[in-house]
Amino acid sequence: MSQFTGNHILSVNQFDRDAIEKVFAVAHSMEPYARRQKRTTVLDGAILGNLFFEPSTRTRVSFGTAFNLLGGEVRETTGMSNSALAKGESLYDTARVLSGYSDIIAMRHPQAGSVAEFAEGSRVPVINGGDGANEHPTQALLDLFTIKRELEYNGKGIDGLHIAMIGDLRYGRTVHSLSKLLCLFDNIHFTLIAPAELAMPDYIIDAIENAGHKLTITDHIDGRVEADICYQTRIQEERFPSQEEANKYRGRFRLNQTIYTKHFQSKTVIMHPLPRDSRMEANELDNDLNSNPNLAIFRQTDNGVLVRMALFALTLGVEDLVAKYERDVVWYTNKSQ
Amino acid sequence: MSQFTGNHILSVNQFDRDAIEKVFAVAHSMEPYARRQKRTTVLDGAILGNLFFEPSTRTRVSFGTAFNLLGGEVRETTGMSNSALAKGESLYDTARVLSGYSDIIAMRHPQAGSVAEFAEGSRVPVINGGDGANEHPTQALLDLFTIKRELEYNGKGIDGLHIAMIGDLRYGRTVHSLSKLLCLFDNIHFTLIAPAELAMPDYIIDAIENAGHKLTITDHIDGRVEADICYQTRIQEERFPSQEEANKYRGRFRLNQTIYTKHFQSKTVIMHPLPRDSRMEANELDNDLNSNPNLAIFRQTDNGVLVRMALFALTLGVEDLVAKYERDVVWYTNKSQ
Amino acid sequence: MSQFTGNHILSVNQFDRDAIEKVFAVAHSMEPYARRQKRTTVLDGAILGNLFFEPSTRTRVSFGTAFNLLGGEVRETTGMSNSALAKGESLYDTARVLSGYSDIIAMRHPQAGSVAEFAEGSRVPVINGGDGANEHPTQALLDLFTIKRELEYNGKGIDGLHIAMIGDLRYGRTVHSLSKLLCLFDNIHFTLIAPAELAMPDYIIDAIENAGHKLTITDHIDGRVEADICYQTRIQEERFPSQEEANKYRGRFRLNQTIYTKHFQSKTVIMHPLPRDSRMEANELDNDLNSNPNLAIFRQTDNGVLVRMALFALTLGVEDLVAKYERDVVWYTNKSQ
C-alpha cells in the first residue's frame, strides 16, 4: 500500500519528486517480468478496462501488455463512433457503468479534461492514457524514466542534466509534461531549439525559470550542443502560416548521423515520442541513426511497459507482492538479451 | 448440470418461473466473485467467442467481464463490415467455423432472428446478446433480477409487485421482454404510461390480461403512482408524425427529483435500460436524480455481470464447482463497498 | 527446441518435407487440448501480438484461440486506419515498438512482402497470417494437414495422392501455396480445372512438372475425375474481361451433390478455403453438400487451430512441455464429439 493505492493517475502535476522516485523504483523492479526472466500472477483475476475512445494502437497495447505481465485480464474498447458517449451519454454515466466491469481503467479520449471528468464518476482508479491536448502522464513518466536509465548507464543522474528539446515545442504535449517533471529536480539545463512560431509556451518557460534552472533558447541548432539528452519532436509543416514559411525551416530541425556528429557529444542520448514519419524527404530523425547506440527511441517504448506495470501495481497496492506470486518462464524468449 | 447445460439462451420465451429462479439463485452466488471478495478459476481454459456483429460496448464488455470473472478467456469481434458475413457467407457457415474456436458464444447481430439461425449451425451453446428488434434476453433477466433485489431490500418479493412503465412502450424491446417475464409471476400490477403513438403492443397487453394481472393504461403521469418500480424508457422524438406532435409530449414523460417527489412513493425504485441521453434539455431521467438512493440504474448494469456469470456457469454446467476453484484476492479493490 | 525455435514463419518456401512432418506431428498432439479433453497452461504468461493490419475475423480469432489453448494471453489490433503505419511510420519502426510488447507476433497486412519486412525489425518471432497476394503459409499448412488426415481416414497417405483443383487457379493464393507444399511429396497427380483466363500460373506448373508429378489440365469438369481430393475455389466474375465472357463459364465450375455424384468418387474429399458466397444463384459449393460426410470445409478450419497451436509451440520451443502443464477440463463441452 502506498499513496497511490486506490487513486487516479490523471496528471503530471500530481507527482512530486518522491512520488516519481517511488514509481521508478517499482518500474525497475518490474524488469525481470517484462524481460520474461520470471512470470508473476499477482493480478490473476483482476480486470483492466482499457478504454480507448480515441484509437492509439501502441499506447493501448502497451497498457494491455503491462497488465497481462502482472497476471491480469484486459477488456477493451477502441473508438467512440458506436459508444453510448456518441449517443449523448454523459461521461459520468459511462464511468459509472464501465467502472462496474473492471478493477482499474486506462482511458484515452480526444477531449481535454474528459479523463478527469470520467474519473469523478468511476468507482475504480483511472489512469489517463491521453486526453487530447491536455495530459498524457504515462508518456512523460516513461520519458523521464528513460532519461534516468540512459544517464545511469553514462554514470550520471537526472540532477544536473542538460537536455536539448528540438522542433515543435509549442504543440508538443510530451515536451511540456516532461519539462514539468524535470522542474522537480535540481540544476537542469534546458536548451530549447524551435522556430519562433513553435516556441515553448510561456507558462513552461516561467516554470523552468521559477525553479531556478538554466535556460538557453534558440531557433536553430548552432555549434556544439553539450547536451546529455537530445529530445527531438515532429515539426508539422501545416502549422506554419504558409508553405513558404515552412520551407524556410525545412531541414533546420532535422537530425541525422552527420548533424548528430557535428553538433552533439558522442554520448548524447537521442529520444523522440514516436511515431516518426518516414515518408518525408528530410524527416526529423533519419533512419541512418538506427545503428547509433545512443538512439533510445525503442528503449523508450520498452520502458513504457515497465512504468505502466509500476503504476498498475502501485494503484492496486500489490507492489510488494509481485515477487511472491512468481514462477518460471518455460518458453523460448530473447527478451533478456 | 442442469436443464441449461449445453443449451442455447435465445429468448425470454424459453424461461419458466423455475428456470428464472434457478438463474437468480446462481447469479446471487456470483456476488463474492463480482465484488472481488474471492477469485474463482472454474472456467480456466474455456474460451468465450464474444461476437458482436453490431457494436455495443457495454453489453460486449459486460459479457467479457463475466467470463473473465469465472476464469475464462475471451476472443471477440466487433462490427460486420469486414466479416465474411458481409461477403455473403451464410450464418450457418459462419456459425460452423466460429463455433470451432470457442466453448460458448455470446452474439449480437442487427437482424431479428439471426442469432437463432446462427445457433442452428453452432457446435457450442449460444447466448443471444441482442438480435435487432427481436430479443435481448439477458437485459430482461438483469432487469427482473434487479427488481427482485431492490424489492428484497424493501422487504418485498416480485409477486404482488406494482410496476410503472413510462415512455416509449411501443418500440422499447426491453419493456416487452420484461413484461413477458413478469407475467410468469403472480398478481402483478402494470401501470403503462405512454403517448398513444408509443403505446404497448396489443400482444403484450393480451399476455398481461390473460395471465390475470392488473393493468392501468394512461398517457400521462397523473396524481400519485403507488408503484414499487418506475421503469423509465427513452422517448425518441423522431418517432412522432411531426415535431409539433412531439412537442406536445415533451416533458410529459420526463422524470426528475421534483416530479418523482410529487408522483411517486419515497421508496419507488427508478430503473432505465441506459444509456440516457444527457444532451436534451428535458431528458427522460434528469441528473438531479443521481443522488437519489432509489436510482437503481447503475445497480442494473452491475447486476448484468452477475446474471451473465450465472448463464455462463449454468450453460457450461459448472454452477456447483465455482467455489471449489476459489482463491483469495490480493489486490486493492473497493468493489466490496 | 527445434529448428523452428525463435524463428519466423513467413513462407511455405521455408518448409521441407521433414519440417512439414514435424509440424503435423505436433499439430496432431494438440488435439486433446483443442477438443477440451485436457487443458494445458504451458504458455501461461506468454503474450501473442495478434496484429491484423488488414481485418480477417476468422484467421485472427483462430490464431488467438490457438494461443489461448496453450495458456497464453492475446493482445490484438485490427485495421490500419488509425495506426502509426497510416501516419507514415516505417514497418521497421512499427516492428521494433510492437515486438517489445509480446513474445510472438501473428501478422496480417494487405501489402505483399510487408510481413517479411516487419519481421526484419521484430525482436520476437513473426508468423505470417497473410500478406496480400503473396503468402498465407498457415492456410497452406492447414490445407495439407487436412488432406493428410482425411486420407488417413480413407487408409491412404499424401504420397500418390490425386488432387483436383477447380475454379480460379490464377488469383487463388491458397492453391499456389498448397501446390508448392504438395510438390515436396512423391507421385502426386494434379488435375487443374479452370477457365483459360484463370489458369494456374506457369511457375507453379513448372514446379509441378520439374518435381516429376503427374499433371492434367482442362477447362471444365468432364467425365469421372478419380480424385482423392476436390479442392474448390471461388470464381470472381469481375475478373473476366466482360460479363458475357463470365456468363459462358457460369455454372461450369460449380459443385453440388448432383455434380459431385456424377463426376467424383464416393469418397472424394471436398475442400474449400472459405468463405463461400451463399448469395449467388449458382455458387461454387452448394449448401446441399452440407450433409455430405466428405465435405471437409469445417474440419479445415478446425484443423487450422491445431496447426497454429503447433507453430506457436514449436516457435516458442515448448512442443515437448505441453503435456507437463496439463490439467483436467471441468466444464461442459461437446468438442470431443
Image (cartoon, coloured by chain):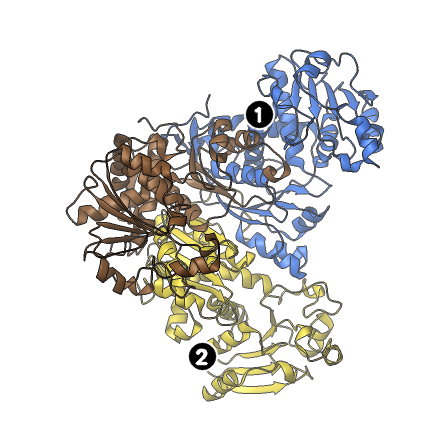
Chain colours: A blue, B yellow, C brown
**Residue B319 percent across, percent down from the top left:** 35, 59
Which quadrant does the N terminus of chain A fall into? top right
**Is residue C32 rendered to the left or right of residue B306?**
left
Task: Say few, some or many: other residues with alpha carbon within 10 Å of mark 1 (under 14 / 14 to 19 / 20 or more).
Answer: some
Label 2, label 1: how many angstroms apart (C-alpha)?
63 Å
In this rendering, the answer to whether B100 lies above or below A224 is: below
Q: Which mark is residue B185?
A: 2
Q: Is residue A44 above or below residue B22?
A: above
Q: In the image, residue B293 lies at what x, y percent?
A: 63, 64
Task: Say which amino acid is labelled 1.
Answer: Arg
Q: Secondary structure at mark 1?
A: helix
Determine the secondary structure under disc 2: loop
* Depth check, front residue: B121 or B143: B121
- Place of residue A298 in the rendered image (x, y in percent of width and height, measured from the top left): 58, 26
Residue toward you, C310 or A30: C310
The amino acid pointed to by label 2 is: Phe
Query: What residue is shown at x 21% (from left), y 41% (from top)?
Result: C158
Disc 2 with disc 1 on a shared chain? no
Q: Residues within 10 Å of mark 2 (few under 14, many from 20)?
A: some
Task: Give the number of callouts.
Answer: 2
Task: Note whether residue A70 is visible.
Answer: no
Label number found at residue A29: none
Which chain does tag 1 point to? A
Chain of the residue on which disc 2 is drawn? B
Horizontal and vertical percent for residue B295? 62, 66
Classify residue A300 by image quadrant: top right
Q: Which residue is mark 1?
A: A299
